[in-house]
C-alpha cells in the first residue's frame, strides 16, 4: 500500500509590494539600486536605477533598459531563516510575472551576510518564472531575494509572490485590536487603508477599535464612509481611559469570544500601516509549528527609512528593555541597505515586541491571560516575558512593520509617565527577574533618580518615588487605581515649576544672562562611565546637598538646546533654561535644596525597603498574577463594577 502525498493549493506567504505614495524616502525599503561603492568609508549610490517614477502600481515596477534593480530589500526579500526555524514550511516558491527581455537572478545569504547566487533565468516577452527554493540550510540566518536586469528593452515586473504548498497548522482568521486616545484622524486613516486591501479584509474576522478618548473616532470626518466599507468587520468599543493596557486587554477579552479568530493583532493609534505586513504576520502564525507571538518592527513616521530596533530584549541584571545590540537602534536604510548590513542576516531572537504592532495567538491569551492592569509602559515587555515563561516565544519578523510617531521628540521619562516607568518596571521585575533581590534593577533605578535630581527634574523624581510607594502597596489595588493614577500624576505637576513650558511670545519667559550654549556638533557625545561616573556622582551629590535654593526671581545662567542639555553638564549649573523635548518652548530648571534633600532621602529609603522585602513582594505579585490578568477581573474594570 502506498501513501500519496497530499498537495495543497499554493498559499501566498509574501507578496511583492511597492509603495504607491510617490514618496522616494520609502523606496529603499522596497527596492534597491544594485550599484554601490564607498568613498572614505561611506556607502555611495552610483546610479539611481530604483527610482520612484518606475513604480507603476502596488505590485509592478519598471527596470529600465541597461539597468539592474535588486529586490534585496526589507519588504521584498524573504526572511528564510525565520521561516525555517519557526514554521512547518520546508520550501518556498518564488513566482514572478514579467514583460520584456532581461535576466532574473536568485540570491541567498548566510548568517554572515555573504551573498550566494542560487539560480538565474533569461526572460523574453511576457512570461512567468518559477523558482522552487529549499528552506533547509538557514538555521542561523539568511534571506532569499531576486534581482532584475533589463537588456535592450525595459523589463516590467507585473507581480510576484513567495508561496508554499505545505498545509498550515491553523486556518483561523485575524482580529485587529486598536487602542486610541484622542487620535481619531490617525484611526480613520488606518481603517481606510485596511478597507482598501481586499486580501487583508478576507483574512480579518473583526476589528476592535477601543476608543478611550474625548475626541471620538465616530465623529471624525470620513469615519462614516470607511465604516460603511468595513461593515461587520468593524466594532467600535467606547470605554473610559484605561491606558494601553486597558485598551489592549479589552481587545484580548473580545477576541476570546470570537470562534473564527485564531490571532489578535494589536495596533497603536498614531501609525501608518503597511497592510501587507498584517497578512505576513497572519500566515507566519498559521504555519508556525507551535503558537508564537509575531511582532512587527517600527519605522519612524517622521523619518520613514529609519528603523528603531530589530529585536527587543530585557537585559536580566539591570532588568531594562532595549535592542539586543546597539547597531539595531535607528538603522537608516538610506545609508546601508540589507546587503550591506551584516547583522541583519543573522536570525535574532526577541524577548518581547512592542505593542505598536504585535500579533498574539488566541491560545496564548486563553492560557496566560490579559495584560497587567498598569495603564501604560512595560505591559508589552511583561507579557512577552510571561508568555516565554509559559513556553511561547516572540518572533520579531523582518518584513512585518509599520510607521509610528517617534518618541525622539518626546521625553516621557520626565513627564507624568515617569510614575509608570518606575512602578511598572519594578512590578515586571518582581514577576520575572531571576536575580536575587532584583539583581541590579534597584541600583540602576536609584541611579536614574540621582541623575534626575542632579538635573533638577524634581517632578519626575517625585513620580518615581510615588511609583515605589505603589509597588509596596502590593498588587491588590492595581485594577481600582488604573483610571486614577494618570490624572493624579499629572496633577502633581503644579507643585514643580520646572514643568511649565514658556512658549514664544510669553512675556514671562526667562532670559539667560550668559546667552545660549553653542550647538552640539558631536553626533554621539559620551558622558562619564566607570570610575569617572563614580567620581562625578561623589562630587555633585554633596554640592547639590549643600547648594542654596535658587530664588524664584533670579536670572538663569545659560540656555541649552534640548539635544545639548546632557545629564553630565546640567548639574554644574544651579539655574538653566532647557528646550522642551517637543520643541514647543523652554523649561526653566532651578535648584531647590529642600526638594533635592527630601527626594533623595525618600528614593533611597524606598529602594532599601523594596530590596529588603523583595522576596515577599515577588511572591505576592506572582501569586496574584493569574487573578489580576484574568478576563473576570478585567471585565469588572471595563464596566466599572
Image: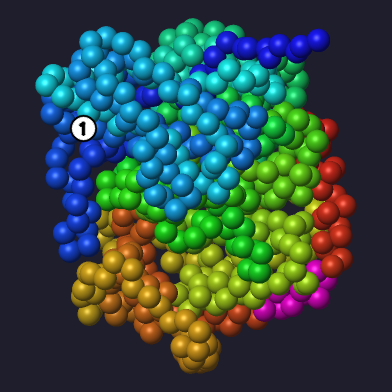
x, y percentage for residue 267? Answer: 54, 33
Q: Alpha-carbon neighbours of circle 1 within 10 Å: few (<14), some, or many (≥20)?
A: many
Q: Residue at x 29, y 66 (%)?
A: 523
Tell whether position 512 is magenta.
no
The C terminus appears in which quarter of the rendering? top right
- Compared across the picture, whether 583 is left or right of 261 comes to left
x, y percentage for residue 508? Answer: 30, 63
Label 1, on which residue?
68
The N terminus appears in which quarter of the rendering? top right
- Compared across the picture, whether 260 is left or right of 546 comes to right
Name the one closer to the observer, 444 or 49. 49
Q: Quadrant of residue 514?
A: bottom left
Whether residue 357 can be seen here: no
Please determine whether, in this image, residue 502 is positioned above or below residue 53. below
Q: Residue at x 31, y 23 (%)?
A: 121
Q: Quadrant of residue 521?
A: bottom left
Please determine whether, in this image, residue 1 is positioned above or below residue 533. above
Residues in magenta, as a range: 604-614
Name the one closer to the observer, 588 or 372. 372
Q: Main secondary structure of the magenta part?
A: helix
Amino acid at each position: 500500500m502506498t501513501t500519496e502525498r497530499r498537495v495543497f493549493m499554493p498559499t501566498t506567504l509574501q507578496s511583492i509590494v511597492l509603495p504607491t505614495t510617490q514618496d522616494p524616502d520609502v523606496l529603499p525599503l522596497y527596492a534597491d539600486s544594485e550599484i554601490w561603492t564607498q568613498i572614505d568609508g561611506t556607502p555611495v549610490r552610483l546610479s539611481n536605477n530604483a527610482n520612484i517614477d518606475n513604480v507603476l502600481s502596488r505590485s509592478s515596477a519598471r527596470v529600465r533598459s541597461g539597468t539592474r534593480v535588486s529586490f534585496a530589500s526589507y519588504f521584498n526579500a524573504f526572511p528564510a531563516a525565520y521561516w525555517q526555524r519557526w514554521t512547518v514550511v520546508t520550501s518556498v516558491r518564488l513566482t514572478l510575472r514579467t514583460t520584456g527581455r532581461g535576466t532574473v537572478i536568485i540570491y541567498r545569504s548566510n548568517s554572515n551576510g555573504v551573498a550566494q547566487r542560487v539560480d538565474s533565468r533569461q526572460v523574453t516577452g511576457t512570461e512567468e518564472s518559477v523558482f522552487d527554493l529549499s528552506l533547509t540550510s538557514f538555521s542561523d540566518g539568511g534571506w532569499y531575494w531576486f534581482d532584475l536586469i533589463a537588456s535592450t528593452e525595459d523589463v516590467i515586473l507585473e507581480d510576484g509572490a513567495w508561496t508554499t504548498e505545505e498545509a498550515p497548522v491553523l486556518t483561523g482568521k485575524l482580529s485587529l485590536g486598536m487602542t486610541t486616545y484622542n487620535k481619531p484622524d490617525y484611526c480613520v486613516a488606518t481603517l481606510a487603508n485596511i478597507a482598501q486591501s481586499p486580501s487583508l479584509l478576507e483574512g480579518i474576522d473583526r476589528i476592535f477599535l477601543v476608543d478611550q478618548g474625548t475626541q471620538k473616532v465616530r465623529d471624525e470626518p470620513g469615519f462614516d464612509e470607511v465604516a460603511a466599507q468595513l461593515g461587520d468587520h468593524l466594532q467600535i468599543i467606547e470605554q473610559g481611559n484605561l491606558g494601553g493596557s486597558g485598551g489592549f486587554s479589552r481587545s484580548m477579552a473580545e477576541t476570546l469570544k470570537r470562534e473564527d479568530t485564531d490571532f489578535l493583532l494589536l495596533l497603536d493609534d498614531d501609525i501608518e500601516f503597511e497592510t501587507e505586513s498584517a497578512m505576513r504576520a497572519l500566515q507566519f502564525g498559521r504555519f508556525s509549528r507551535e503558537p508564537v507571538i509575531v511582532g512587527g518592527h517600527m519605522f519612524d513616521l517622521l523619518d520613514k527609512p529609519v528603523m528603531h530596533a530589530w529585536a527587543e530584549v530585557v537585559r536580566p541584571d539591570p532588568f531594562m528593555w532595549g535592542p539586543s545590540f546597539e547597531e539595531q537602534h535607528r538603522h537608516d536604510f538610506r545609508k546601508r541597505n540589507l546587503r550591506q548590513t551584516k547583522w541583519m542576516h543573522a536570525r535574532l531572537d526577541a524577548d518581547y515586541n512592542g505593542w505598536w504592532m504585535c500579533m498574539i495567538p488566541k491560545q496564548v491569551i486563553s492560557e496566560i491571560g490579559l495584560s497587567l492592569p498598569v495603564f501604560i509602559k512595560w505591559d508589552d515587555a511583561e507579557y512577552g516575558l510571561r508568555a516565554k515563561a509559559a513556553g511561547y516565544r516572540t518572533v520579531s519578523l523582518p518584513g512585518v512593520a509599520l510607521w509610528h510617531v517617534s518618541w525622539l521628540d518626546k521625553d516621557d521619562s520626565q513627564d507624568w509617565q515617569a510614575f509608570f516607568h518606575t512602578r511598572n518596571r519594578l512590578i515586571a521585575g518582581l514577576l520575572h527577574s531571576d536575580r536575587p533581590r532584583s539583581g541590579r534593577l534597584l541600583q540602576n533605578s536609584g541611579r536614574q533618580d540621582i541623575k534626575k535630581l542632579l538635573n533638577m527634574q524634581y517632578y519626575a523624581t517625585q513620580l518615581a518615588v510615588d511609583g515605589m510607594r505603589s509597588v509596596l502597596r502590593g498588587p491588590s489595588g492595581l485594577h481600582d487605581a488604573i483610571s486614577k493614577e494618570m490624572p493624579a500624576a499629572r496633577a502633581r505637576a503644579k507643585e514643580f515649576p520646572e514643568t511649565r513650558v514658556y512658549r514664544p511670545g510669553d512675556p514671562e519667559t526667562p532670559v539667560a544672562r550668559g546667552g545660549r550654549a553653542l550647538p552640539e556638533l558631536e553626533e554621539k557625545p559620551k558622558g562619564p562611565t566607570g570610575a569617572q561616573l563614580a567620581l562625578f556622582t561623589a562630587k555633585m551629590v554633596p554640592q547639590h546637598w549643600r547648594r542654596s535654593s535658587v530664588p524664584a526671581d533670579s536670572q538663569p545662567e545659560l540656555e541649552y538646546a534640548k539635544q545639548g542639555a546632557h545629564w553630565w553638564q546640567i548639574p554644574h549649573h544651579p539655574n538653566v533654561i532647557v528646550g522642551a523635548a517637543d520643541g514647543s518652548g523652554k523649561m526653566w530648571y532651578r535648584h531647590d535644596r529642600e526638594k533635592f534633600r527630601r527626594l533623595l532621602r525618600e528614593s533611597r529609603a524606598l529602594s532599601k525597603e523594596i530590596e529588603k522585602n523583595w522576596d515577599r513582594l515577588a511572591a505576592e505579585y506572582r501569586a496574584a498574577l493569574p487573578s489580576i490578568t484574568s478576563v473576570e477581573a478585567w471585565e469588572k474594570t471595563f464596566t466599572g463594577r
